[in-house]
């Protein structure tokens, strides 16, 4: 597809190529060639005529910019392309030219070509989704046991393991891959119905021709024309949009954990990656930026697909055309985000010492819940909660470790001091021990995800 420099910056050459002018038009020509061969197999035209049509179905024979220009006046890209195809065939076989596009309609050709392009697009997404998940699994193996702060409402909460956080990134990706595989089975079908979806111009051979075409194009046989039945198709687009959201969640975490004040992870650097035109010290999270851009754009595209679903009678007026225009952009954004994160994840840097430093810098406050739960066994939860809240406020106000204040408070209550020996209290403030439940849960999650 033709794209502005800013669109290209947020995508990949591969995905832009999938929906480029040449690729889409070659897809349309592939559909026309498959139609001619299927009709020849069913006796609607001669094998020689089908061969003449197939030999003219090469995109390099056509002036693509001129065809795109004509399509605006014609109301469909298929109309000028079929007109030129017919002329090409007529130069070799006038009889065959009379049978070009026989019994089909413009939407059949365009929808089927978009199905072929989308199949290639989904292959790219699946490839890089696997690459990203593999990189995240490897990251969890290397650094999964490291204690790290959990944060809720943008504030430090308690201690988890880095593997637990990685598992939270992985779970939606694994589910996305499963849902995309299911959605593609329903959505990627041949479109062939003729003028109003009945295949009437092909007579009783119509269904057999559709089956032969589907087999030739390696698509499931259609259950019927879906000219204005867009549910399975749009459902696939929605799944791509959900994937963008899951990628954006990962990117958001990376960008926050990579802030210099936090510095727990960093995207790969070097070779001009993530630099600043004004500030030499900066290390910008460019992969996260690309993914977050996709997250910003995908909802509008998905909304447009949903908005276009109520189509008029047997052929939509404007809504199908809007869907076509939005479809490619959704995949372009999704693959740009996915490829950026997959490439960065393979070299993501994890600073375990910084993670521990950030925990310790909070003066033990992240262990307040564990202390309160331990004391609750002795004095009840309300009293324990109130005591630890009071001590936490003092820790902040006085700049003292919560551990020391708890020791002092226990000393004033001999029954509590004896019930909570100092080694037991020390263990409650141990970050490595605090991360153990998250480690165990992460191990279970990662094993199941694999």
Image: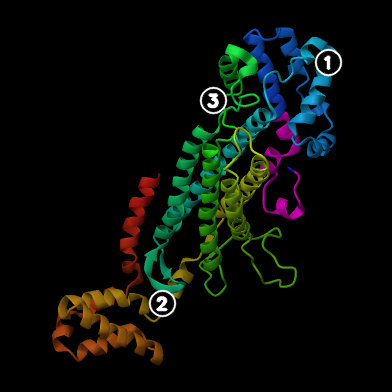
* Magenta-span inclusion, residue 12: yes
Q: How far apart are marks 2 and 3 (CA)?
A: 62 Å
Q: Quadrant of residue 148?
A: bottom left
Q: Where is residue 32 in the image (x, y as percent from the top left)?
A: 70, 22
Numbered mark located on residue 90 in the image: 1
The crowding category of the residue bearing disc 3, from other C-alpha atoms within 10 Å (few below 14, some 14 to 19, many at least 20), is many
Residue 399 visible to an observer of this rendering = no
Q: Residue at x 37, y 69 (%)?
A: 159
Q: In which quarter of the image is residue 59?
A: top right
* Secondary structure of residue under mark 3: loop
Compared to residue 94, the image places residue 345 above or below, namely below
Q: Which residue has dot 2 on it? A: 360
Horizontally, is 431 left or right of 139 in the view?
Answer: left
Q: Residue at x 56, y 18 (%)?
A: 211
> What secondary structure prevails in the magenta region?
helix
The crowding category of the residue bearing disc 1, from other C-alpha atoms within 10 Å (few below 14, some 14 to 19, many at least 20), is some
Q: Position of residue 327 (x, y in %)?
A: 63, 43
* Magenta-span inclusion, residue 116: no
Q: Which residue has dot 3 on it? A: 222
Q: Distance between the residues labelled 2 and 1?
A: 80 Å
Q: Nearer the viewer, residue 296 or 414?
A: 296
Which stretch appears magenta? 2-27
Residue 347 visible to an observer of this rendering = yes
Q: Which of 423 and 374 is in front in this view?
A: 374
Q: Closer to the N terminus: mark 2 or mark 3?
A: 3
Q: Quadrant of residue 426?
A: bottom left
Q: Distance between the residues labelled 3 and 1?
A: 31 Å
Q: Which of 108 and 195 is in front in this view?
A: 195
Q: Nearer the viewer, mark 2 or mark 1?
A: 1
Q: Residue at x 62, y 45 (%)?
A: 331
């Amino acid at each position: 597809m033709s794209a502005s420099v800013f669109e290209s910056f947020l995508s990949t050459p591969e995905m832009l190529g999938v929906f480029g002018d040449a690729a889409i038009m070659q897809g349309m020509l592939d559909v026309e060639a498959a139609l001619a061969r299927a009709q020849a197999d069913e006796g609607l035209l001669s094998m020689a005529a089908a061969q003449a049509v197939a030999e003219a179905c090469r995109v390099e024979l056509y002036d693509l910019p001129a065809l795109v220009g004509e399509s605006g006046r014609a109301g469909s890209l298929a109309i000028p392309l079929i007109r030129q195809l017919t002329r090409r065939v007529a130069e070799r076989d006038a009889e065959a030219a009379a049978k070009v596009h026989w019994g089909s309609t413009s939407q059949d050709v365009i929808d089927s070509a978009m199905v072929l392009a989308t199949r290639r697009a989904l292959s790219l997404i699946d490839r890089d989704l696997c690459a990203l998940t593999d990189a995240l699994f490897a990251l969890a193996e290397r650094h999964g046991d490291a204690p790290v702060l959990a944060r809720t409402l943008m504030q430090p909460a308690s201690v988890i393991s880095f593997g637990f956080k990685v598992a939270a990134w992985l779970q939606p990706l694994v589910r996305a891959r499963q849902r995309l595989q299911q959605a593609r089975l329903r959505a990627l079908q041949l479109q062939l119905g003729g003028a109003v979806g009945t295949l009437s111009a092909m007579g009783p051979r119509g269904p057999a021709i559709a089956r032969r075409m589907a087999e030739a194009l390696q698509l499931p046989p259609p259950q019927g024309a879906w000219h204005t039945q867009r549910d399975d198709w749009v459902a696939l687009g929605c799944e791509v949009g959900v994937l963008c959201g899951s990628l954006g969640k990962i990117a958001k975490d990376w960008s926050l954990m990579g802030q210099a004040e936090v510095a727990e992870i960093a995207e790969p650097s070097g070779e001009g990656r993530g630099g600043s035109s004004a500030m030499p010290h900066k290390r910008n999270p460019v992969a996260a930026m690309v993914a977050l851009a996709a997250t910003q754009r995908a909802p509008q595209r998905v909304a447009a697909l949903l908005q276009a679903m109520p189509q008029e009678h047997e052929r939509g007026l404007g809504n199908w055309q809007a869907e076509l225009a939005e479809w490619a952009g959704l995949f372009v954004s999704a693959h740009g985000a996915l490829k950026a994160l997959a490439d960065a994840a393979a070299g993501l840097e994890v600073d375990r010492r910084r993670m521990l430093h950030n925990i310790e810098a909070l003066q033990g406050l992240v262990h307040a819940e564990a202390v309160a739960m331990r004391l609750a066994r002795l004095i009840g939860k309300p009293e324990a909660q109130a005591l630890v809240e009071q001590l936490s406020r003092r820790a902040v106000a006085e700049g003292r470790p919560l551990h020391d204040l708890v020791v002092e408070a226990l000393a004033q209550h001999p029954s509590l001091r004896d019930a909570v020996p100092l080694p037991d209290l020390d263990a409650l403030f141990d970050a490595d021990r605090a991360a153990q439940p998250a480690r165990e849960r992460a191990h279970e999650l990662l094993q199941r995800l694999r």
